[in-house]
Amino acid sequence: MLAASEFPGHDARRFYSSRPIPPKKPSSSASDAATAAAPKVTIQTIGKLHREDQPISVVTAYDYPTGCAADSSGVDIVLVGDSLAMVALGYKDTTEITLDEMIHHCKAVARGVQRAWLVADLPFGSYNASTEQAIHSSVRMVKEGRAEAVKLEGGKRLAPRINAIVHDAGIPVVGHIGLTPQSAVALGGFRVQGRSLDDAKRLIDDAFALQDAGCSIIVLEAIPPPVAETITRLLAVPTIGIGAGPLTSGQVLVISDMMGMFDRFTPKFCKQYLNMGQQLERELARYTGEVRGRKFPELGTHTYSMSAVVEDEWSKYVQKEFGLDLASASSLRKDRAAKLSQAAVAGTTADQG
């Protein structure tokens, strides 16, 4: 089975903007230096971590900045989750996002992720109809979105499609059982799964079916810890928990939840490491106040200069032609005069000393 990172041209990424992005300069920070020295995480890397009982860290990312931040932090896997439908695009739930939208966001994240293993969700409706549709969507996510694996929600009923994606298309698949948000309506809402004996047994059956179909990893969401631990200890592949307790092979959180950037709700299982939403509001309010008070931008600090000669010529020209006395030119002249005066005083003092 070929990993997506082995596809020809996968790492030949280009950056587009109005100003070409230069190569990253060497950084003195410990985290950036460690990231630069760290080898590329592959499916084999994840398997090695699992065999050595090293917890696997996973976080979601939705655009170039969050992709860069996640990659530089040292996480093992970056997931472009369909949760972006709600936390980034403002949709009511995850079923509204389209495959084209997911690919668009995955491409942006891929430009920022150079080290971590990149996984992307297939959204609702992009793999449900048939095996052919599932393969086509998976290939698009790898070819266009630059993902290295795809994630699907559902139990043993999806095993034939997962088998085809893995063995026919050669694309790694991450499974997802327990609470599957794409089918929350059928589950009776966003409810914990596996609380009854029968439901817990069904989850074990689902987990084995996904493993046998070829899943490289299985996400366990909103499952009681004893059930999640049982599945983890029985399977040969890693499990990634989200609301499934500390005894899975690794953990995943939605970046917008853990950083306090989503205002609708915070799941019980989420630890909030930063309240970025409130911080953003506070600093944006400060910016608005400075704009209204004409404190930003500061002349000479946040502006581009002309030579003193050209500036004087321009001021005389607009005064003569339009009758305008430029406040910016006047302010800059006063500022320059003050600095020259300070320099002269400092020089005199030094001479006297």
Image: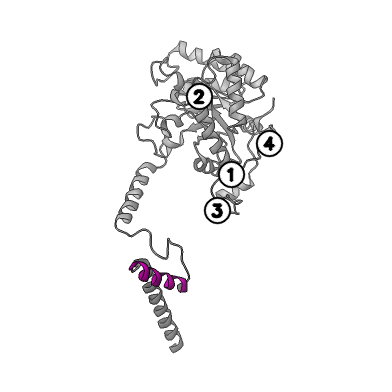
Relative depth, front residue between 201 and 254:
254
Q: Is residue 313 magenta?
A: yes
Q: Is residue 73 left or right of residue 193?
A: right
Answer yes or no: do the residues labelled 1 and 3 have beta carbons within 8 Å?
A: no
Instruction: Name which quarter of the figure residue 72 lies in.
Output: top right
Label 1, on which residue? 15
In this rendering, is residue 34 above or below 301?
Answer: above
* Sequence order check, earlier mark of 3 and 4: 4
> How much space separates mark 1 and mark 4, taking CA atoms?
15 Å
Residue 179 in view of the camera? no
Helix, strand or loop at label 3? It is loop
From the viewer's perspective, is the residue at label 3 or at label 2 nearer? 2
Q: Looking at the picture, which amino acid does disc 4 mark? A: Gly
Helix, strand or loop at label 2? It is loop
* Sequence order check, earlier mark of 1 and 4: 4
Mark 3 Cα within 10 Å, few/some/many (few <14, many 20+)? few
Q: Is residue 295 magenta?
A: no
Could you tell me residue 125's position as x and y percent?
A: 50, 19
Q: Looking at the picture, which amino acid does disc 3 mark? A: Ser
Q: Which residues are magenta?
A: 309-324
Label 4, on which residue? 9
Answer yes or no: do the residues labelled 2 and 1 have beta carbons within 8 Å?
A: no
> How much space separates mark 3 and mark 4, taking CA atoms?
30 Å
Please tell me whether the stretch drawn in magenta is mainly helix, strand or loop: helix
Answer yes or no: do the residues labelled 1 and 4 have beta carbons within 8 Å?
A: no
Q: Tell me the number on the disc at residue 123.
A: 2
**Quadrant housing the N terminus:** top right
Relative depth, front residue between 99 and 247:
99
Instruction: Name which quarter of the figure residue 261 lies in.
Output: top left
> How much space separates mark 2 and mark 1, taking CA atoms?
26 Å
Q: Looking at the picture, which amino acid does disc 2 mark? A: Pro
